[in-house]
Image (tube, grey):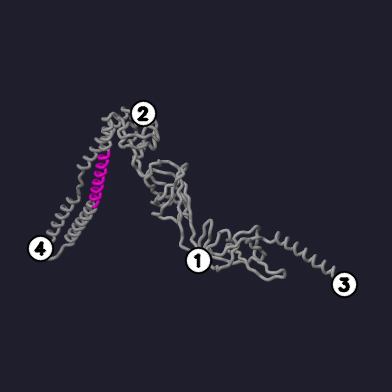
Amino acid sequence: MQKRYVKALILFFIIIFIFTILSRAADSVTVAVVKVQMPRRGSINHETVIEGNIEASEKNKIKIQEGFKIDTIYVERGQRVAKGEKLFCIDKEEIEKQLYKLQIEIEISELNKQSLELQTYENIYEEEIKKAQIALDRAINDRDINIQINGVELESDKRAVEDAESSLNLAVMQKEKQDAKNEELLKKNENEKKRLELELQLKRNEYENIEELNKIGNIVYAEEDGIIDEIYVKEGEKTTGGEVMSIIDSITDYIFTGKTDTEKAKYMKAGDLVSVKLIGKNAPIDNAEIKSISPEPEDNIVKIAAAIPKNSNISHGMKATAKHIYSTDEYPRIIPVDALRSDAGQYYVLAVDEKNAVMGKEKTAYRINVEVSDKNDTFAAIGSLGDEEIITKSNKPISEGERVRVEK
């Protein structure tokens, strides 16, 4: 009988042992395995990569007056040219037509100016005032004589003096109005003469430029060594008065230009250095300096311009990216951004707490609401945290109150 009890007891413990093993095995499958990390001091790096282009800082823009027919273009875009090299040729007949047209316009403007200079502004009411004053003097004299004869002022004499005074006052008022009008006309005359003089100066300069072009055989030459940047006309087309061609000077500086959003640009300022990487090139160009950050017509977009250090391996139009890194001051607490969670606009983290249970000690996740001071794609600066072990990774989704197993 006793042996039976012993066997039963042994069997009981064996069953308990088996269930414990099974329970632990099941626990290892159902309980989330997590990695934890304590907050630490550190900075947040904000890295921004901007796509853009290399551009020449200055271009020699060649402009020709409107109405010239381009006869021959001797160069192509991207071609290197030397000072004095032929660029393009203008139709000679068109030049002669333009010279004749300008000559006529200059003569007309000169005649108009002479006409304005001969213009006078008289005031006819000056003579009216003289006449009215004579009439008033006569009426006063007649009144005074009659007073001496009759001993009293006659009503007719009184009215005559009053009428003469009214006529004089009216003439004075009319003269003042005419003086003001003449002064206004004189100012308009002076302004028009100045406008005509400026117009004449422009037309004379234009005439001289075209005449100079005609003297050198209607061919435009390169003024400096450089590279043809853009050609805005074709052979046989007429000029519109704008640019015909632009040339990049051989000794010009280069800039990187690109666009980014205002949120990223808030970490940048003029004078910051960026690293520029040319597409297809391995080695980046360091120490390019941001010169300007300017708003673009698109909403929340800014244009970044950075000066490139002297480099013989770059040219206008090359594709490039610029990388800017801004490092904040140290924060007391930063955590991996993967540990950060949000719920209804509230950021929080899950920390690990160890408690005693029936099966021994077990670890559970609990929630801590936090305020985010700053963050990037890797780290977040957090307030209201101590030295808690923060869950940074988990092999399955977890929530507050669930049991977890910390991976060593």
Q: Which residue in the protein does label 2 denote? A: 72
In the image as oriented, which residue stretches furthest toward the right? 1
Q: How far is the residue under mark 4 from the one under mark 2? A: 103 Å
Q: Are marks 4 and 2 in contact (CB under 8 Å)?
A: no
First of labels 1, 4 by sequence position? 4
Residue 101 screen position, x and y as percent: 29, 32
Q: Which residue is mark 1?
A: 332
Q: Residue at x 72, y 63 (%)?
A: 24
Specify whether 224 is left or right of 407: left
Provide the major secondary structure of the magenta segment.
helix
The mark that comes first in sequence, 2 or 1, is: 2
The boundaries of the magenta stretch are 180-202
Residue kind at label 2, given as amino acid type = Thr
Is residue 331 within the magenta segment? no
**Residue identified by numbered label 4:** 149
| C-alpha gap between disc 3 and disc 2 | 123 Å
Viewer-nearest of discs 3 and 4: 3
Q: Find disc 3 in the rendering and name its residue.
A: 2
Residue 132, picture quadrant: bottom left
The answer to whether 403 appears left or right of 378 in the picture is right
Say if the magenta span includes residue 199: yes
The mark lying in front, picked from 4 and 2, is: 2
Type of amino acid under label 4? Ile
